[in-house]
Image (cartoon, rainbow, N blue to C red):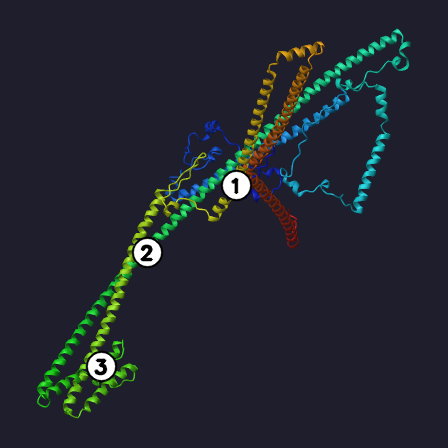
Amino acid sequence: TKVTIIRLKEPEDMAAGDCSLSNTKVTIIRLKEPEDMAAGDCSLSNTKKVDTTWFGSISHRFVDLGPYHEDQFTIWTSDLLAKDEIILLKNTVRNLRLEVNRTFDKLFADKEHLINTIRQKVARLRVIQRELVDTCNAPAPDLPFEEVNWTQEEQVERILEITDDELPVSRFLTPSEEAVNAQRLADEEKLKREALMNDFKERALLEMMDGVLEARSWEDMLKDDVPKPSCMVNKPVELWSAGDREDVREYNKKVDNLKTERGKYKIRLMEEWEKIVTIVQESIQEFDTNLIKLNSTKLKVEQAIHQEHLKMLRIHSHTKEGYLLDKQYAHLVKTQEFLANAELPGAISVMNQMQTMLTECKVNYESFELKDKALDKRFRDQLKSDYSTALSKPQLDQMYKLYRKMPKLKMITVPAVWIEMAKRITGVSPSSSFLPDDAIDVIKGVDLLDKQAFQMSNIDMKVVEFVTKNRRLRIESDFKMRAAGLEIAEAEATLQHHTRNVALIKDNILHLTNCIGRLLSNQNNLEQDPIIQLILEQGQVEVDLTGHFEDFHDVQLISKSKVDSANNKVISAGCQKMAESEKVDRLKKIIQDEEWKQKELKISIENLKTHIKRIERTKISRETLEFLRNEERGCVAKDAKTDHEAEAIVAYYRDKIGRVDAQLDVVQKQKDETKAEIRRINMTVRDVEEKHRELIKDEAFKKKYEEDQKERMKALLKRCALVQKIQNQVTRLECLRSDLTTLRCKTYPVLKSKFV
C-alpha cells in the first residue's frame, strides 16, 4: 500500500528558496482522539475557553484555537471584531499547515529509520542465505521483499539531477578527460602491483603463526568439512588395520557431530529468518496503516481549511453587504431630503403661480364675453334708434346679418397672433410684416367684407360705414376672446403638467420612504439574523420552498451548466445501471428456465427409477420359475412350446431393459449437459456481477487525487526553478557588490597614517 501526500505550503515557504528535502513538507496531520482532546493542554486552563459547538469548523480537533476567538453570533456586531476574527482565522489556517508539516517531519524521520532498518535486515537475510548454502548445504529461501529505495516523488531534488545510468548512451569524454582517466587507472594498477609485491611480511607472519592469530567463530568452524583419514583415501577397506578402523570410527563420529551442529545452526538460522521477516512485515504494515490513517486525516484537515476559508469569505461578504447597505441608505436619505426640501416646494410654488395665472386668464375671457354681448346689444339699440326711420325692417335684419358676418378663419394656435390681428383690425398697429400668411389672409378677408358692404346700392353709406365700424369692433373683441381662450388652454395644460410633476415628486418621496424602510429592515435582518455555518456529521438540512424568490436569499446558487452536467452524469450512470439491471434480469430468467429444465429432468429420472423398480418388483409365474430352475440344473425342457414362450419372454424383457438403459443413458447425458450449462450460466452471472460492481465503484476520487498530485509536482518543479533563479541572482548580486567595493577602493584609496 503506497500513499503519496503533497504538502500545503505557506507563501513564505514558497519564497524561502531552499530546494532541499528537509524543506519539502508533506501535508500529514495527526487527528487527535477524543481522549487526547479531553486531556488537552493545561497551559490555558486559567484563560478563556472557546465554545466549539457553534464554531463552524473542525479545526479545534487538530490545533489549539486560543482564547480570543468570537462565536458566530457576536462577530457581526462590530467591523473591528470581524477584522480581528479574519486575522485569527488566518492564523488558525497557518497553524493547521504548520501542524501538518511538524507531523510530516516525524513521519519522514520514521520512514528514514524504517528504510535503514529494512536495509540492515535485508543484508542480514542475504547473509543467512549464504550461510544456509555454504555452511548447511541447504537450499536458501527467496527474499520475501526487496530492498526499499527512495523515489523521485519523495526526493524532489533528484528530478533536477541526471545520473549516468539514466541515459541510454555513455558519457562523452573529451580527449583531456580520457587522458586523465587513463592516467588515474594506470596509477591504481601500479599501486596494486606494488602492494602485491610488498606483502612478504604479512605472508611470513601468517606462515610463522600457523593460524594462531585467527579468531575463528563457531559458525566459521562449521563451514569446514572433517578431513578424511589417509586409509580411506589410500587403502581399500580389506587392508585396513585396527588403528585405521579406529580412525574411521572417529571420523564417522566427527561427521555425525558436524551434521548435528549444522542442523542446529540451520534451525537457528531459520528461526532468525522467520523472526526478521515477521518484524519487517509488521513494521511495513504498521507504517502503511499509519499512512492510510494520515491520508484520511489530511482530507479532514483540508476540509477544516476550506471551512475556515468559507467563514472568512462569509465575514467579508457580510461586511461588504453592510457597507453597501449603509452607502445606499445615505444616498436614499440624501435624495429624499433633496426632493422634500428643494424640488417639492419649488414645484408647488410654480403650480400655485400657474393656478393664479389660469384664474386671471378666465377673468379676462369672461370680460371679453361680456364685452361682446355689450357690443351686440349696443349695436342693436343704436341701429334701431338712429336708423330705424331710414331702414325698413328687412333692411335692419340684413344689416344685423352683415354685422354678424365673419371672414373665413384659419387654424391659428398662437394667442399673440390673435392679439396682433385684433390690433390690425382696428388700425392700432397698421403694419403686418411679421404676421403669418394665414393671419394676413384673415385680415384681407375683413377688408373684402367691407368692400362688399360698400358696394350695396340700396343702403345709405352712413349706415354701411356704421355697420362696418361696429363689425370691426366685434371682430376685434372676438379675436381677443379667442386669444384669451388659447391662453386658458395653455395655462390649463401647464397647470396639469406641474400638478403631475408635484404628484410624481410626492410619489418618488413615498417610494424612497418605502425603500428606506425596506433598507432598514434589511439592515436589521443583516444584524439580527446572521448566516451561521454549522458542521453536521453526515446530516442533511431540508428547506421548505414557497415558490418565491425569497427562498434563494440565504442559499448559494450554482450555474445551470453545472446542474446540467451533474444531471447528465447521473442520467448516464442511471442508463448504465438500467442496462446492467436489464442484463441481470435476462440472465435471471435464463437461470430460472435452466433450473426449471433441470428440475424437469430430475423428475423424469425419478420416474424412470420408479419404473425400473416397478419392473424389478414384477412377479414371475410358476412355470417360468420352474423353467428357469430346470435350465439352471442343466435339464432340457421337454415342452418345446414352453421353451419358445420362455425365450420370447426373456427376449422381450431383455429388449425392454435395453430400451430403459438407453433412456437412462440419454437422461444422464442430458443431466450432464444441463449441469455444464448451469455452471456456464453461473460463471456468466459472476462475471456480470463483477462488471456491475466495477461500474458502481467511484473512480472520481482516484482520478482527482492523481490530477492533484501532478499539479502539486508541477508547482514543486516551478518552485525549484524559481529558487535556482533567485540563487543565481543572489550570487550575481554578491559579485556585483564585491566589484563595486573594489571600484570604490580604487577610486578612493585608503592611505595608512604614520601615526597609526
Which of 62 and 681 lies nearest the eye of the viewer? Answer: 681
Residue 626 drawn above or below residue 18: above
Residue 534 coordinates in the image, percent (x, y): 42, 37
The CA span between labels 1 and 2 is 58 Å
Tell me the SS state at disc 3: helix
Under mark 1, the amino acid is: Ala
Under mark 2, the amino acid is: Lys
Q: Badge 1 local density, few (<14 within 10 Å), some, or many (20+)?
A: some
Which of 401 and 668 lies nearest the eye of the viewer? Answer: 668
Q: Badge 2 local density, few (<14 within 10 Å), some, or many (20+)?
A: few
Which of 114 and 12 lies nearest the eye of the viewer? Answer: 114
Residue 422 bears which disc, if any? 3
Residue 387 bears which disc, if any? none
Of labels 1 and 2, the one closer to you: 1
The CA span between labels 3 and 1 is 94 Å
At a point 74% along the width and 43% down the height, the residue shown is 168
Query: Can you see residue 601?
Result: yes
Residue 334 bears which disc, if any? 2
Whether tag 1 and tag 2 are in contact, CB under 8 A, the answer is no
Tell me the SS state at disc 2: helix
Whether tag 3 and tag 2 are in contact, CB under 8 A, the answer is no
Q: Badge 1 is on which residue?
A: 573
Of labels 3 and 1, the one closer to you: 1
Residue 350 coordinates in the image, percent (x, y): 25, 66
Of labels 3 and 2, the one closer to you: 3
